[in-house]
Amino acid sequence: MYNKITKLLENKNILIVEDEISLQEIIVESIQEYVNCVYTAINGLEGLEVFKTNSIDLIISDIHMAKMNGLKMSSEIREIDPNIPLIFLTAYDTDENMLKAIELKSKSILIKPFDKKQLLISMGLAISSFNDDFKILKLKNNFNYNIETKELKQKNEHINLTRKEQKLLELLIKHQEHTVPFSLIESYVWSENGATPDAIRMFINKLRKKIYPELIENIQGIGYKLTLK
C-alpha cells in the first residue's frame, strides 16, 4: 500500500498552510521527495492567494491561524473548486470546528503530533478518492468497508448499516487511531435530537456485534477510536 501511495503522489502539487514554521518545515521535508512541488503559506489569506495562482492538487492546512483561519480559507476555496482534497491539522479543537471541517468534505483530520507515515497515508487516501485501490478500507476477519459508498461487507456478504451507523464509521475513519470524544459523536451522529452517553454506548455495542468488538475501542471517560492494527 505504501508504494501505491508514493506512486499516486509523485506528480502532485501540494499546498501546506501552517503558521508554525518549524512544523511547516518538517512537513515539507517529510513529503518533498514524494511529490512534484510543495507550496507553502503561513495563514489563510496567503494560502488562498497561492491556490488562486498555482495548480494545486491537495491542500494540507492548520485550522487556527491569524488573518484567516484554515476553515474560512477552505470555505472560499470550495467556492472555486468543490473537489480539491483537503486535510486539516489541529492540536486541539472544538466540536463545532471539527463538524465544520467535515462539512467542508475534508478527507482527513490529523491530530498533532502525527508521524510521517500517518501524513503520507492521509495524503494518499485524499488524492485517491476515486481510485478503487483506496476506496476499500480492509478490516480484520475478512471485513471490508467502502469509504465512498459506505458499504460494509464480510467476504462477499453485504452487512446492512443504518444511516447513523454509516455516519459513526465515517467519523471514526476520519480520525482513525485517534480518540473521538463523546460530544463530537453526539453532535455529528445525533445532530437533531442529541443522545445520552448510555444511548451512544448501547448504539456502539450493537454496531460492534455487526463487525467485531476490537475495531471500536472504548477510551474510558473520553470517547471511542477506530483501531485498525
Image: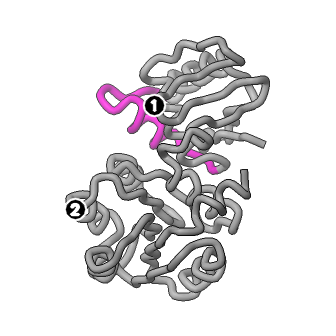
Residue at 56% across, 51% down: 125
Where is residue 101 shown, x and y percent of the image?
Answer: 38, 53
Foreground tag (1 vs 2): 2
Q: Left or right: 139 with respect to 43?
A: right
Quadrant in which residue 41 is drawn: bottom left
Residue at 71% across, 18% down: 155
Where is residue 71 shown, x and y percent of the image?
Answer: 32, 63
Tell me where the magenta segment starts and ends, as one range. 178-196
Check disc 1 and report its element: helix, strand or loop. Answer: helix
Query: Label 1, on which residue?
Result: 167
Residue at 46% across, 41% down: 183
Which coloring applies here? one colour
Label 1 to label 2: alpha-carbon separation: 27 Å
Tell me the crowding category of disc 1: few under 14, some 14 to 19, or many 20 or more residues within 10 angstroms, Cα based. Answer: some
Query: Label 2, on which residue?
Result: 80
Amino acid type, callout 2: Ile
Whether the magenta-drawn stretch holds residue 183 is answered as: yes
Up/down of 149 relative to 172, above or below: above
